[in-house]
Image: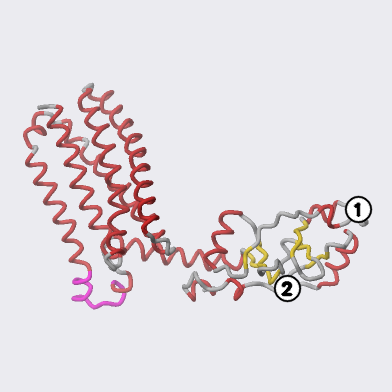
């Protein structure tokens, strides 16, 4: 297991992980002098890019291997180097470095201080195994916590403790299921009158639940990154509702069209279109709001968000669907 996964701290300084054995080429070199300098450097590590510096070690550019090999020996390096270099500040963390690798898709990143002096190189190979292992562990932890189970508790707790750790959150699902059953009983007359409505209940619920879990997962990732403020809460909530509305409209149109072509009942199609649009937008809001509210209350949002958000989503979805059906079908 690599250093990143061992530490488990994304806020470690990137300077702790830089490579010092990289090739420096002077800005005043020609291609021939640069090649000679590279041969004398005896760098043991993998050479990815050739970095061009001045006499004060300030980074001036990067020289691609292709340009170095295809230009005449008397060509000045300053004429063929790339001056716009993606760099990491020396104050960056491992989390920052990971984001840079994802955004820019580079094989290595130079780390520079506030004066532009190059401090070392961060190679993407350093992160490959560590990030893969870390993501696998975190995803496993998130999946269990979303359903109300702590992975450590499952692995280590004895039988009574494991039961106590899991059962309380299942009560959310039980309560949500009973509430949905009461809603179905309340609208029993319209279901009996238009039997086709019952056929679409599973897909309506599945769509809303899926979007709720998507929003919930994205929100937890934002919280893990420490991006939690009132401004971000308002912006995040607005964005999730808008995205949920668009997703709901697209899904509702598709399912409604299928229902209309299949059953030939336009009121059923309208009911599906409107109720799915409302349900998915509400599900996205619940997926964002529940973990945010738990964190604001200084509770672990991973431990209970999933069961609570899904129970609320199911109740709201059936309320929209059957309530609208009762209006359309009298």
Left or right, 29 with respect to 88, comes to: right
* Position in image of residue 88 (x %, y %): 62, 64
17 versus 140 height, above or below? below
Please tell me which residue is depicted at 38% across the width and 46% down the height of the picture.
Answer: 239
Classed neighbour count for the residue bearing mark 2: other residues with Cα under 10 Å, few (<14), some (14–19), many (≥20): some
Return the residue at label 2.
21
Foreground residue among 126 and 28 = 28
Most common secondary structure along the magenta stretch: helix
Residue 163 falls inside the magenta stretch: yes
Circle on res. 72: 1
The answer to the question of whether label 1 and label 2 lie on touching residues, with beta carbons closer than 8 A, is: no
Instruction: Report how far apart the C-alphas of labels 1 and 2 lie in the structure.
Output: 27 Å
Classed neighbour count for the residue bearing mark 1: other residues with Cα under 10 Å, few (<14), some (14–19), many (≥20): few
Please tell me which residue is depicted at 30% across the width and 69% down the height of the picture.
Answer: 150
- Quadrant (top left, top right, bottom left, bottom right) of the C terminus: top left
**Colour scheme:** secondary structure
Which residues make up the magenta segment?
154-165
């Amino acid at each position: 297991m690599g250093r990143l996964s061992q530490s488990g701290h994304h806020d470690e300084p990137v300077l702790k992980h830089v490579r010092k054995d990289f090739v420096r080429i002077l800005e005043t070199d020609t291609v021939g002098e640069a090649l000679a300098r590279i041969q004398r450097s005896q760098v043991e590590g993998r050479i990815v890019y050739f970095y061009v510096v001045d006499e004060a070690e300030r980074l001036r550019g990067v020289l691609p291997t292709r340009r170095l090999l295809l230009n005449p020996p008397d060509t000045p390096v300053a004429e063929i180097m790339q001056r716009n270099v993606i760099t990491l500040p020396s104050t960056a963390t491992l989390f920052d470095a990971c984001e840079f690798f994802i955004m820019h898709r580079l094989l290595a990143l130079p780390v520079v201080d506030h004066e532009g002096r190059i401090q070392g190189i961060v190679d993407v190979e350093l992160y490959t195994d560590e990030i893969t292992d870390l993501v696998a562990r975190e995803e496993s932890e998130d999946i269990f916590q979303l359903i109300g189970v702590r992975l450590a508790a499952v692995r280590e707790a004895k039988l009574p403790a494991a039961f106590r750790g899991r059962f309380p959150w299942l009560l959310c699902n039980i309560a949500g299921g009973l509430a949905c059953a009461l809603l179905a009983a309340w609208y029993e007359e319209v279901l009996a009158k238009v039997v086709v409505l019952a056929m679409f209940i599973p897909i309506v619920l599945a769509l809303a639940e899926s979007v709720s879990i998507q929003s919930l997962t994205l929100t937890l990732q934002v919280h893990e990154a420490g991006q939690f403020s009132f401004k971000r809460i308002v912006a995040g909530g607005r964005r999730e509702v808008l995205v949920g509305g668009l997703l709901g409209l697209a899904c509702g149109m598709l399912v409604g069209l299928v229902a209309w072509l299949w059953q030939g009942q336009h009121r059923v199609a309208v009911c599906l279109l409107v109720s799915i649009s409302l349900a998915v937008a509400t599900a996205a809001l619940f997926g964002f709001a529940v973990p945010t509210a738990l964190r604001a209350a200084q509770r672990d949002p991973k431990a209970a968000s999933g069961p609570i958000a899904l129970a609320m989503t199911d109740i709201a979805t059936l309320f929209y669907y059957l309530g609208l059906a009762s209006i359309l079908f009298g």
